[in-house]
Structures are given as structure tokens and as C-alpha cells.
């Protein structure tokens, strides 16, 4: 009887952590990035010119974000989540959603629908543009991912 309880306890102890694990942050970042960019023909065309795609950009985005400090990660995730929400809720393109946020954080509109500061918006914008420049400057290859492979 005791051995059955012990075996059941051990099985539960082994299976419980697997059931409680959090989703991979990179997978969540890739999903958010994909939601932010997919369907934006201008972005897709630009990435294609660099020899990349939304998938390639988002892989690089996630790898580069993982290389940043926690504060930068949280800021970029917050802004990207807001952009994705605006795109989904209002049926906007990427530029339109970013433009609405920019207008609001610069105080050019009375609307207060986002909780983002100008500094957060700029940090996220610099990060997103930096990933794009990385792909452009490296013929569609992500320097962070290439650095991991070498």
C-alpha cells in the first residue's frame, strides 16, 4: 500500500512541473511579431527586398529581443502588444496603428486609449527598426542568429 502511494506521489511530482511550464518566451514573441506584421503589404515587400520575410524578421526579432535586458524586453512587448491590439480591434494596418499611438503619446489627440509613454514608444521603435536594419545590412540574415550558429 505504501509503495503504491509513493509511486503515485513520484509520478505526480514528475508530471506536475511539465503541466505547469510557461510557454517559451521566444514563441510568444514570434507570435506577437507575426500578428504585428502579417498582412502589411509594404512591410512584406520591404523584407522581401532584403532577402527576408515576415517569418525571418520575426525569428530575428525574437532572438534579438532575448539578447536585451528585462526592461527593454518588457517595453518592446508592451508596445507591440498594443499595436497588435489596435490592428485587431480596429482593422488597422501597422503604420496606422503606430501612427495612432504616436499621435496620442505626443499629445496631438485628446484620445487616451493607450498606456504608453513617449520613451517606451521610442525604445520599441528603435528596436523594431534595428532588427529591420540588421536584416537589410546582412542580406536577410540575422546577425544575432548567425552569431549563435558560429
Image (cartoon, rainbow, N blue to C red):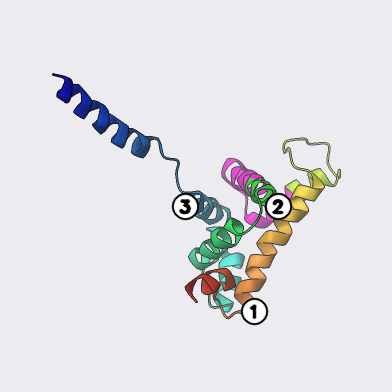
Range of residues picked out in magenta? 78-100
- State the image quarter where residue 122 is shown: bottom right
Q: Nearer the viewer, residue 47 or 16?
A: 16
Up/down of 136 relative to 110, above or below: below
Residue at which label 1 appears? 137
Residue 91 sits inside the magenta stretch: yes
- Location of residue 55 in the rendering, given as x and y in whole percent from the top left corner: 48, 64
Residue labelled with disc 3: 27
> Element at badge 1?
helix
Q: Position of residue 148 (x, y in %)?
A: 51, 70
Residue 40 seen anywhere in this rendered image of the structure: no
* Sequence-first tag of 1 and 3: 3
In the displayed structure, does residue 131 sit left or right of residue 100?
left
Which badge, 2 or 3, is on the more N-terminal residue?
A: 3
Label 3 secondary element: helix
Residue 95 quadrant: bottom right
- Classified by dominant secondary structure, the portion drawn in magenta counts as helix
Residue beneath the point at 51% across and 55% down: 30
Determine the secondary structure under disc 2.
Answer: helix
Dot 1 alpha-carbon crowd within 10 angstroms: few under 14, some 14 to 19, many 20 or more = few
Depth check: 120 or 3 in front? 3
Amino acid at each position: 500500500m505504501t509503495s503504491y502511494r509513493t509511486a503515485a506521489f513520484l509520478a505526480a511530482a514528475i508530471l506536475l512541473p511539465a503541466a505547469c511550464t510557461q510557454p517559451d518566451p521566444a514563441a510568444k514573441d514570434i507570435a506577437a511579431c507575426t500578428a504585428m506584421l502579417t498582412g502589411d503589404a509594404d512591410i512584406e515587400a520591404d523584407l522581401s527586398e532584403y532577402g527576408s520575410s515576415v517569418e525571418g524578421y520575426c525569428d530575428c526579432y525574437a532572438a534579438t529581443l532575448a539578447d536585451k535586458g528585462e526592461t527593454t524586453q518588457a517595453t518592446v512587448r508592451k508596445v507591440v502588444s498594443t499595436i497588435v491590439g489596435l490592428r485587431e480591434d480596429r482593422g488597422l494596418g501597422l503604420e496606422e496603428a503606430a501612427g495612432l499611438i504616436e499621435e496620442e503619446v505626443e499629445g496631438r489627440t485628446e484620445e487616451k486609449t493607450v498606456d504608453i509613454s513617449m520613451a517606451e514608444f521610442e525604445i520599441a521603435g528603435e528596436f523594431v527598426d534595428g532588427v529591420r536594419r540588421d536584416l537589410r545590412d546582412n542580406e536577410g540574415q540575422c546577425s544575432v542568429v548567425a552569431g549563435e550558429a558560429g
